[in-house]
Image (spheres, grey):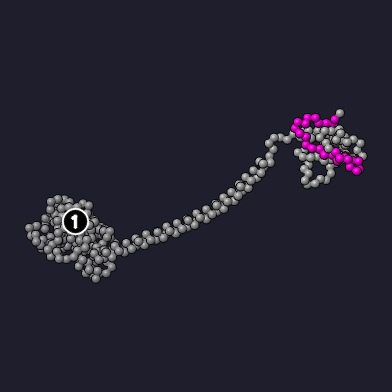
Amino acid sequence: MTNFSLGKPMQIGGEEVVVVRDVLGAMQTDKASETFSMVEPKGADGRPAIYVSENDLARLREDYPGMKVYGLWQLMFHNNAIRFGSPLVAFPLSTPRESQGLYLLLEGDIDSPEGIVSSGEYAGGFIVDNYDIDVEKASFIDVDLDLLKLPRQPAYTRLELSQKLRAENKRRWLVVGSMCALIAVGAAATNYGLQTIYKSRMADYSTKRSLIDELDGRVRALAAERLIKRPDDAVMLGQLFHLFELYPNATTPAVNDDVKIGFAGTHILITPKKAQVDPATAMKGVASTLQPDLSYRLTIEAPSENDADVGVTQ
C-alpha cells in the first residue's frame, strides 16, 4: 500500500490534489463544534452523506491556492476500495497499520454502507470514546495510489458552493438568453423571408388575376357575338348570281360608314351605263334607281326567311 500524506499535495489520476479527512455519520465529540460542508449526499446504497471540515478547507486554500481538495472516504467510496463484513473498517496512515489511521464504525448490517454509524480517527490501537473495539480486528483498506480515480466534484465550502451555484445559474441564464436571442433573430429572419415570398406570390397572383379577368372579358365579348346558328346565305347568293347573269360588269360604289354591306346587310351595285333592263323588274327583293348616265343603282336587301322565290321573274 502507498502511504497517504493527508493535507499534502499528491498525484492522483494524473493531477496534483490534496486529500483531507472527512466524516460520515455521527461525529467525534472533539469535532462537534466545527462547521462542515457536504461533499457527497447520501448514497443510493444507504451510505451516509460525507462531510469535510470548512476549517480544514480554509487552511488548505491558503496553503495550496487553486488546488483541488478531496475527502479520503469520498475517494475510497468512488473507487470501491472499501471491503465490508466487519464492524470496523480502517484506513491506516502509518506502520504498523493499527497504530494510526481513520475508521468507519458499523452496526447492524455490517455488509452494507447502510450500517455505517460513525467515523473518526484512531491512534495507538484504540478509538477515542470507544476503547472496547479492537482495531487489530478491523477490515483494513489497501489501495494502489496509481490506480485511483478522482471523483467528479471536489470539496467546497458552503460559501464556495453558493458562489459556484450562482455562477452556474448565471451561465445557464446567459445560455438561455443567447438561445432566446438566436430564436428571435431566426424568427425575424423567417418572418422576413416569408413576407418577401408572400409579397412575391401576391404580385404574381395579382398579375394572373388581372390576366384572368381580361380573358373573362374577352370570353364574354366573344360569347355575345357568337352565332347562335350557322348562317344560311343561299338566298342572297342566288340573288347576286342572277344579277351578275344580267350584268356581269356590275360594280360596287363607295358607300357611307352608316351603310352596312355584307351578307347580313345591304348589297349596293351599279349596272353599266345605258342598261337596257331594270333588274328590279326582273328580280324580287331588288330596288333600283335610274341615274343620269342611264345606269341603275341597285339595292339588294337581305330576304326574309319566308321568301322562297328567288330568281328572275317570268
Front-lying residue, 15 or 201: 201
Viewer can see residue 69: no
Q: Main secondary structure of the magenta part?
A: loop
Q: Residue farthest to the top?
A: 314
Q: Is residue 289 magenta?
A: yes
Which quarter of the picture shows residue 149?
A: bottom left
Which residue is labeled 1 in the image? 48
Q: Is residue 179 magenta?
A: no
Magenta residues span: 288-313
Question: How many numbered badges does the structure rendering display?
Answer: 1
Relative to residue 214, is residue 237 drawn left or right?
Answer: right
Instruction: Look at label 1 and name its amino acid.
Output: Pro
Residue at horizontal 83%, vertical 37%?
287
Quarter containing the C terminus: top right
Image x and y of residue 160, in percent: 26, 65
Image x and y of residue 39, in percent: 23, 60
Image x and y of residue 235, in percent: 78, 33
Quarter containing the N terminus: bottom left
Image x and y of residue 264, in percent: 75, 38
Residue at horizontal 85%, vertical 31%?
312
